[in-house]
Image (tube, helix red, strand yellow):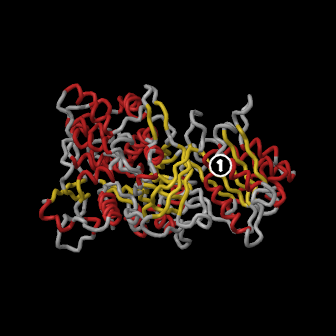
């Protein structure tokens, strides 16, 4: 039987947001006088769930409605058929989801979890909360009122849960929590024998594994060590210079080992950070870049040189840890960062401003200052020069340096031991005209292939499974959504040279034929007689130029023009693959397909919707979208 005097908070996070939210829930509960235990779902035995009294779930949704990796085992356990509808009777729960309403399956994981817990007999304390990245304040715009409601409902159930009442007071905000991170500094001379003297790539790999495995935001236990290192061999701009968009074609070759992937897979890249920004951060925080450190989170044993400690627990230079694990010049800090800063501000006007930002009354102004302007950690620290935060707090609160995933745009059969990417170089202006850029895309675009930079990467399964050679394909990929389909077409061209293959119909979209017709020659060459995309082989290649006429014209409009071809291919058993921006395109394409099925087959709209839903359930309708 679990301890009923504490609140259990289980989170499932893919990028760290659900972890941030879960830690905030735990922090507030403890400030209200209720001990809290915050655990990742993969650290909790689902078999023990009936022993709990109150469980708070904080769950993100990834990809196209997928569960985070840390939730998958827990979720499979809950789906067991032998669990009765009374299994969780007596358990009270609350679910808060983190998602992006730009995606079709918005907060799907939280919705599924909420329903399953209810089906198993658990009782909801409050209605599930749904955080939305599209909200001006991000997920906190929904988390704030949801948490307030949760605390009041729990207090109504049992006032002894919160001895201080269900409302946080100013005095609750005036006590600094203890950091959850401990930094141990090691003597450089004594630790010299542990420092790597191996070859360059092995040394870099070990540094990355050490830094990222020690990070308190580590989300997955098996992804610290890169799968391999790549070296850029081509950096080509695909869009016309000065057109307002910068899309690049990158080619890489493997350095450390041969690489294996399939079409439809994603390449995950750990971006480099600007060395000048790292130096500025270290100087601003009065840190010694050469210090040897190990980072320990709650419950982690201290480092012992003669224990059976693996390489990931060996000391690392402080500068390397900052460079490889802390996003100091790209990501914006969370609200709690400002609250903790207020305790270390020695200038009264800075302390008062930070306290205001951390308060409920200051949330809107903090949004204007922080998130809307996308201020970085370094910029915030420079705006409050009297603040000197201990390194423990910085390690805990600075957003982790996240990897970035890109759809692979090459076939391994066509390019052995090489991998291609098609990347939009992200840049924009804030309301106050600050220029902002995407960390990873800008870093990649700035690499010179002659400089032979080592790029740490991981290969992950994407949302688009590789099709069988005989399967007819309907591909829809506007903009950089064409990336995985370039790989599909390359692969099918090789397959067709040694056997019969299914037809491929591809709809591409861009703004202007002259500015951003990505891979124009490639598509047109495969659309010629006998090519993979040729009409004489049952396929086709069609482009929608959205800005080359007065009225905007998108891929779904082109699909309507060619609806007989679309329906003919679908009737022949084609699989549908959609890739591109998550904003409106996937929903618009689905609506267009419903209309085509309805008109061409003569069935009602409801039947067309069911028909496409059946395709999805059969694994023949795939979407890969990103915001």
Where is the N terminus found, in terms of image quarters?
bottom left
Task: Identify which residue is drawn at 41% across, 55% down.
Answer: 452
SS of the residue under disc 1:
loop
Q: Residue at x 35, y 29 (%)?
A: 362
Q: Residue at x 66, y 43 (%)?
A: 517
Q: What is the quadrant of residue 12 in the picture?
A: bottom left
Q: Position of residue 521 (x, y in %)?
A: 69, 49
In-image side of 125 versus 470 (left or right): left
Q: Left or right: where does residue 183 sit relative to residue 406?
A: left
Of the pair 185 and 437, the residue shown nearer to us: 437
Q: Position of residue 113 (x, y in %)?
A: 51, 57
Going by the image, does 25 lie left or right of 585? left
Q: Say which residue appears at 70% left-offset and 68% top-offset.
A: 495
Q: Callout 1 environment at 10 Å: few (<14), some (14 to 19), or many (20+)?
A: some
Vertically, is 178 above or below 426? below
x, y percent for residue 303: 19, 65
- The residue labelled by disc 1 is 519
Asked if residue 58 shows in the view, the reply is: no
Query: Which of 64 and 234 lies nearest the eye of the viewer?
Result: 234
Residue 11 visible in rendering: yes
Above or below 167: residue 185 = below
In this rendering, the count of numbered labels is: 1
Above or below for 132 versus 262? above
- Direction right: furthest residue: 602
In depth, the one of 303 and 95 nearer the eye is 303
């Amino acid at each position: 039987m679990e301890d009923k005097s504490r609140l259990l908070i289980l989170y499932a996070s893919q990028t760290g947001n659900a972890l941030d939210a879960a830690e905030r829930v735990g922090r507030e509960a403890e400030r209200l006088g209720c001990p809290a235990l915050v655990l990742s779902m993969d650290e909790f035995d689902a078999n023990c769930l009936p022993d709990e009294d109150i469980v708070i779930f904080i769950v993100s949704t990834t990809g196209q409605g997928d569960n985070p990796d840390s939730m998958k085992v827990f979720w499979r356990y809950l789906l067991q058929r032998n669990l009765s509808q009374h299994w969780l009777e007596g358990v009270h729960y609350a679910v808060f989801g983190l998602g992006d309403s730009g995606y079709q399956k918005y907060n799907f994981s939280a919705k599924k979890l909420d329903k399953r817990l209810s089906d198993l007999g658990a009782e909801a304390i409050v209605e599930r909360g749904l955080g939305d990245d599209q909200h001006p304040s991000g997920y906190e715009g929904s988390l704030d009122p949801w948490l307030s409601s949760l605390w009041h409902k729990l207090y109504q159930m049992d006032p002894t849960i919160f001895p201080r009442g269900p409302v946080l007071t100013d005095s609750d905000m005036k006590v600094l929590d203890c950091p959850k991170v401990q930094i141990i500094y090691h003597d450089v001379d004594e630790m010299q024998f542990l420092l790597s003297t191996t070859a360059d790539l092995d040394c870099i790999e070990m540094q990355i594994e050490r830094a990222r495995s020690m990070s308190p935001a580590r989300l997955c236990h098996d992804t610290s060590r890169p799968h391999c290192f790549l070296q850029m061999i081509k950096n080509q701009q695909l869009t016309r210079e000065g057109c307002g968009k910068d899309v690049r074609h990158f080619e890489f070759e493997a350095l450390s080992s041969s690489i294996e992937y399939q079409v439809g897979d994603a390449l995950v890249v750990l971006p480099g950070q600007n060395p000048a920004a790292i130096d500025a951060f270290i100087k601003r925080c009065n840190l010694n870049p050469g210090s040897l450190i190990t980072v320990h989170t709650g419950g982690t044993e201290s480092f012992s040189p003669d224990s059976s400690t693996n390489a990931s627990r060996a000391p690392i230079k402080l500068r390397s840890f900052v460079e490889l694990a802390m996003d100091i010049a790209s990501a914006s800090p969370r609200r709690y960062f400002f609250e903790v800063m207020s305790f270390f501000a020695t200038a009264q006007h800075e302390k008062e401003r930070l306290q205001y930002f951390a308060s409920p009354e200051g949330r809107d102004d903090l949004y204007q200052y922080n998130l809307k302007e996308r201020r970085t950690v370094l910029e915030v620290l420079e705006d409050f020069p009297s603040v000197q935060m201990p390194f423990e707090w910085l390690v805990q609160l600075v957003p982790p340096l996240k990897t970035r995933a890109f759809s692979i745009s090459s076939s391994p059969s066509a390019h052995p031991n090489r991998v291609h990417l098609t990347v939009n170089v992200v840049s924009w202006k804030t309301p106050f005209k600050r220029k902002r850029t995407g960390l990873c895309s800008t870093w990649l675009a700035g690499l010179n292939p002659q400089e032979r930079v080592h790029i740490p990467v991981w290969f992950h399964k994407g949302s688009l499974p590789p099709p069988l050679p005989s399967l007819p394909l309907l591909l829809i990929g506007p903009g950089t959504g064409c990336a995985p389909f370039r790989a599909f077409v390359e692969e099918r061209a090789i397959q067709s040279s040694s056997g019969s293959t299914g037809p491929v119909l591809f709809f591409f979209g861009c703004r202007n034929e002259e500015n951003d017709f990505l891979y124009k020659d490639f598509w047109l060459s495969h659309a010629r007689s006998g090519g993979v995309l040729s009409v004489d082989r049952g396929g086709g290649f069609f482009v929608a130029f959205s800005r080359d006429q007065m009225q905007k014209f998108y891929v779904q409009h082109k699909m309507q023009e060619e609806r007989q071809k679309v329906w003919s291919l679908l009737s022949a058993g084609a699989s549908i693959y959609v890739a591109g921006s998550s904003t409106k395109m996937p929903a618009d394409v689905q609506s267009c397909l419903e209309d085509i099925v309805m008109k061409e087959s003569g069935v009602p709209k409801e039947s067309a919707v069911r028909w496409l839903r059946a395709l999805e359930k059969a694994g023949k309708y795939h979407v890969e979208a990103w915001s």
